[in-house]
């Protein structure tokens, strides 16, 4: 049976983000988290592969315990096993240190056929984690795929690039990030599994469980340094036109002419 691993990330619900002014890191514990929307297609692809070829799906996420409800959401969609990678030593991780932890956990789950991730998170938005994790594991890295199918012992991936689509043939095991546009339909959670998951808890793996080297973790293992974090001030420069409707239309046409948007 195939073994598929899906990495999901909890991202702040827009509007609830707080930054620690001392460390310049996000205060993850206090903010409301949602499942990274770009990870839904990765979960959907894993479940479709399970339906087609038979598979056991493990979902993993690195972060604090407020990610547990998101792992449970994934379970309700059709995932088999939930693992939370959580340890104080992971705090302050940049993409490399995050990828290192994910790679150690994925290695512990060996043998596996496929690792799926989202294309990018909606908060960090670097899209570096899939390639970095693949690099650390020595796996072929396929970015932005929209389809994955098995032919004999090989996997065929359809990948989107800026010019169109390409077909790539790879052998197991592989790591792929899934295109946010891969599916027209994403299944809702099943009621039966929503009830079932109330009785379930994820496995919690710490740094020692994945035999991680302490100097590669968290802030210590992060070559990226955030030197400053600031709120973007929006300076709105608008013109308010006043008057009766006919007058307003005339004024507006004048503005468009001045800006050479229209020529009458
Ligand atoms: C210096 C520095 C300090 C930071 N400190 C912290 C901190 O203290 N706490 C903190 O939470 N973040 C911290 N971050 C942010 C953290 O590095 C990123 O959240 C993380 O590395 C993922 O990067 P990204 O969001 O750009 O992911 P992307 O590369 O855009 O994500 C692509 C895909 O990778 C997978 N993925 C990404 N992150 C995870 C994850 N954590 N678990 C499972 N799958 C994942 C998902 O499938 C996702 O769709 C810090 C970043 C920097 C640069």
Image: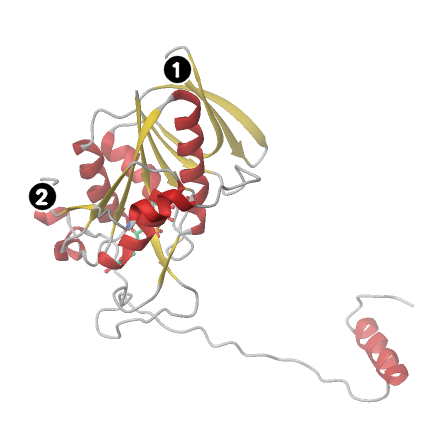
Taking the spot 22% from the left edge, 46% from the top edge, the residue there is 202
Q: Is residue 157 left or right of residue 174?
A: right
Q: Is residue 128 visible?
A: no
Return the residue nearer the eye: 185 or 229.
185
Q: Mark on residue 213?
A: 2
Q: Assign a secondary structure to mark 2.
A: loop
Local SS, label 1? strand
Between residue 168 and residue 184, name the one nearer to us: 184
In the shown orientation, is residue 11 left or right of residue 83?
right
Tag 2 or tag 1, which sits nearer the N-term?
1
**Neighbour class for label 2 at 10 Å: few (<14), some, many (≥20)?**
few
Residue 122, can we see it? yes
Relative to 32, say whether 169 is above or below.
above
Is residue 180 found left or right of 256 in the rendered image? left
- Residue 33 screen position, x and y as percent: 35, 60
Query: Is the C-beta of the residue carrying label 1 under 8 Å from the nearest atom of ligand 1?
Result: no
Q: Residue at x 88, y 85 (%)?
A: 247
Name the quarter where the C terminus is drawn.
bottom right
**Numbered mark located on residue 154 in the image:** 1
Q: Nearer the viewer, residue 21 or 155?
A: 155
Image vertical order of residue 73 relative to residue 174, above or below:
below
Q: Position of residue 49 (x, y in %)?
A: 42, 27
**Dot in front, 1 or 2:** 1
């Amino acid at each position: 049976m195939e073994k598929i691993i899906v990495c999901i990330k909890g991202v702040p619900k827009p509007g609830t983000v707080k930054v620690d002014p001392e460390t310049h890191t996000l205060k993850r514990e206090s903010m409301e988290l949602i499942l990274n929307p770009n990870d839904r297609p990765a979960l959907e692809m894993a479940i479709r592969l399970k339906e087609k070829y038979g598979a056991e799906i493990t979902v993993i996420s690195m972060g604090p315990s407020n990610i547990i409800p998101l792992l449970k959401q994934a379970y309700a969609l059709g995932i088999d096993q939930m693992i939370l990678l959580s340890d104080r030593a992971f705090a302050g991780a940049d993409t490399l240190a995050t990828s290192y932890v994910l790679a150690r956990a994925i290695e512990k789950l060996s043998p596996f056929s496929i690792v799926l991730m989202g294309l990018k998170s909606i908060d960090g938005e670097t899209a570096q984690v899939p390639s970095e994790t693949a690099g650390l594991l020595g796996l072929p890295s396929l970015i932005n795929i929209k389809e994955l199918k098995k032919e004999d012992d090989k996997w065929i991936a359809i990948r989107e690039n800026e010019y169109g689509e390409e077909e790539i043939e790879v052998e197991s095991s592989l790591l792929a990030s899934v295109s946010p546009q891969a599916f027209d339909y994403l299944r809702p959670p099943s009621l039966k599994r929503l009830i079932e998951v109330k009785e379930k808890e994820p496995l919690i793996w710490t740094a020692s469980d994945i035999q991680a080297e302490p100097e590669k973790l968290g802030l210590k293992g992060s070559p990226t340094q955030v030197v400053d974090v600031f709120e973007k001030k929006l300076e709105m420069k608008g013109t308010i036109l006043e008057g009766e409707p006919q007058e307003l239309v005339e004024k507006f046409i004048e503005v468009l002419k001045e800006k050479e948007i229209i020529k009458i």
